[in-house]
Amino acid sequence: MRNSEGYLIVMKINDVWEELEKIKKVYRELIVTTNYKQINNSEIGWDRYTPGIEKNLYAREYETLLQNRQYSFLLNKDMGFIQIYFKYKDETTFDKIKMAYYPYPIKLREDSYDIDRYLSDSEDLILQEYYFDLWNILNRELGVPVEDKQLEEIVSILAEQLNLDQNIDDLILQKFNHKYEITNSSHIRIDYSPVTSHHVCEIQIGAINNIRLPLDRLVSPFLFFDFIIKNIYRKSYSSMFNNSTFKQTFIFARKKSYRVGSFNEDNIFITHL
């Protein structure tokens, strides 16, 4: 069935709510807290929903969204959070859909003035230490001394014993990179919007506005959530979710995902089925 604009009707707002409730039940062991709500008869999201993307340090973007409770599901073990947002023009016509995953941030570089401000504002102990170390490195590059006596002693011993002329700046950067494991540098999301400037449904990574991966099918909230979990818990996923309840819910969720209207892409396109 198609609406007047030619787009397929996938789910009504009650169907979206049921999928969110199923996510909360099936993945309850991985979820710290939920924050989704039906705002009105045409919108499911959360209080004080803020559209758009911040273009500063990803760690700061993540923390700002977290502090303002801009999420649907907060995952445990520092696995980040997931947003599920649906807005309808009317009972059967989509206006805007956003399903996004924000991983816990580890590594990026930015101006030292901003890092100093982030350090003052941060409420996360791990991110505070990350901002502090990054601030030290950036300020060293600007000529402000960084105190790292242990590293300087090691360099001195190596230089004397092996007759090496090692750059202390390079070693401090190596120490920083060793301390913070790279996990991801930004978020990934699926957007649906019936516009003519880009594809109706697409995958977008971070704030790269000019490169979008078109999807020929709109994924249901349960399938999007499961895709994220399957990848971040890659080694244990099969053993964690192998019961009949999960399988039945997964099959039902696949039936909620249908081909998006007319689709015309000669190069890359992705389908989840």
Image: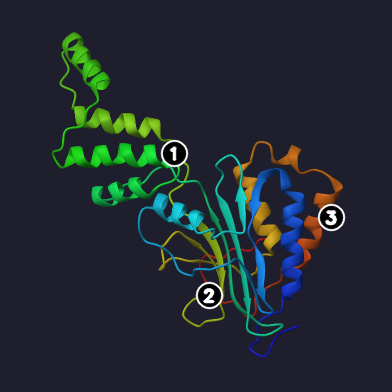
Q: Quadrant of the N terminus?
A: bottom right
Distance (Cα) linking label 1 and label 2: 40 Å
Q: How far across and how far down the image is residue 107, in percent?
A: 39, 43
Image coordinates for residue 132, horizontal then vertical, percent: 32, 39
Q: Would residue 271 be seen by someone viewing this image from the given angle?
A: yes
On screen, residue 42 above or below 83: below
Residue occupying the point 16% across, 33% down: 145
Q: Nearer the viewer, mark 1 or mark 2?
A: 1
Residue 86 x %, y %: 63, 71
Looking at the rendered structure, the kind of residue marked 1 is Leu
The amino acid beneath tag 2 is His
Tell me which label, 1 or 3, sits earlier in the chain: 1
Q: Residue furthest left?
A: 143
Pointer 1 residue: 125
Quarter that holds the C terminus? bottom right
Q: Residue at x 72, y 68 (%)?
A: 16
The residue labelled by disc 2 is 199
- 102 lies left or right of 261: left
Dot 2 lies on which element? loop
Q: In the rendered structure, which disc, 3 or 2, sits on the residue that comes first in sequence?
A: 2
Pick whichever of labels 1 and 2 is earlier in the sequence: 1
Name the residue that disc number 3 marks: 248
Nearer mark to the viewer, of 3 and 2 = 3
User: For residue 150, which quarter of the picture?
Assistant: top left
**28 sits left or right of 148 in the view:** right
Amino acid type indicated by mark 3: Gln
Q: Which mark is residue 140?
A: none
